[in-house]
Amino acid sequence: MNWLLEEAMPFFWCPGCGNGIIMGSLFRTLESLGRRPQDVVAVTGIGCWGKADDYVRTNSIHGTHGRALAFATGVKAANPQLTVLALMGDGDCATIGGNHFLHAARRNLDMTAIVANNFNYGMTGGQYSATTPSGTRTSTSAFGNPEDAFDLCAVAKSAGAAFVARSSVYHVRLLDQLLAEAISHVGFSLVEVVTSCPVHYGRRNEMESPVAMMRHWREVCLPLKQYQALSPSERQGRISIGRLHQEEKSDFMTRYRRIQRRAKGGTDHG
């Protein structure tokens, strides 16, 4: 209860939405890490998961669509002692905010992006996004999405993120573990959370109930080693989960301080 803003209840989200599960996992993680609400900043954009800042007792910034990482970058650069969390959906992060996503990973500033991926624009009517699987149905692809989807974790790794992981709202213990690792890791960290939108994505893709969606995630989300053992054809429709990439390297502020020392006449050329 240190983290939940009870007076803002009940949640805005639809019955069966996975965002409450993600929020519970985040609260448990922050408590287990010994963080204090006054030392944490939750930065959001627009979208279902973008409403998360309404329910937290941390500092918060509610920004414009696709710009959560830009605001989070400013916060962390201004006060590196803060724990900065960018809470985004797939539309906010990868579709409208895709360019900020690439550069946040490349810059490697020490903050954590927690992306609730429900494979569509859930808040605005269920349109397809950059992560909607090819062939699946949405309000703007009634007979199947013609586009290939981004693999958010692969994009983040390629762009330079220090820590990349994925879980689902079914695999809650794994999610707790990965959030703790991500927040503790120095550098830009991404945790993608495969989550349920039964109202839009589910009912258009033969998963009309929250239970059906949870069963689906249980079946298609596989631990990384199990996923890697499959042939390329067997991987179709499957999702790898777990810690997918971890790298120890200098974060942005460490490199920036070196430049400051050189500018002041120091000899740090590392």
Image: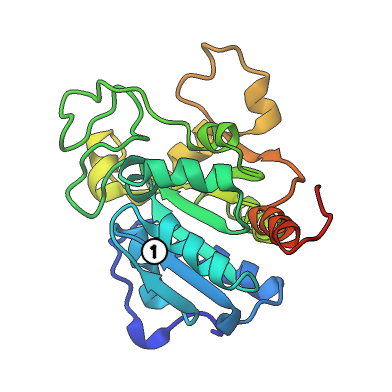
Residue sitting at x 31%, y 59%: 48
Q: Is residue 174 left or right of residue 49?
A: right
Residue 267's image quarter? bottom right
* Residue 232 x %, y %: 55, 12
Residue sitting at x 34%, y 50%: 92
Q: Is residue 217 left or right of residue 254?
A: left
Q: Which residue is mark 1?
A: 44
Quarter of the image with the N terminus is bottom right
Name above or below for residue 20 compared with residue 59. above
* Residue 80 x %, y %: 63, 69
Residue sitting at x 22%, y 24%: 144
Residue type, label 1: Thr
Between 93 and 51, the residue placed more toward the observer is 93
Name above or below for residue 174 compared with residue 119. below
Q: Is residue 173 left or right of residue 21?
A: right
* Residue 175 x %, y %: 60, 53
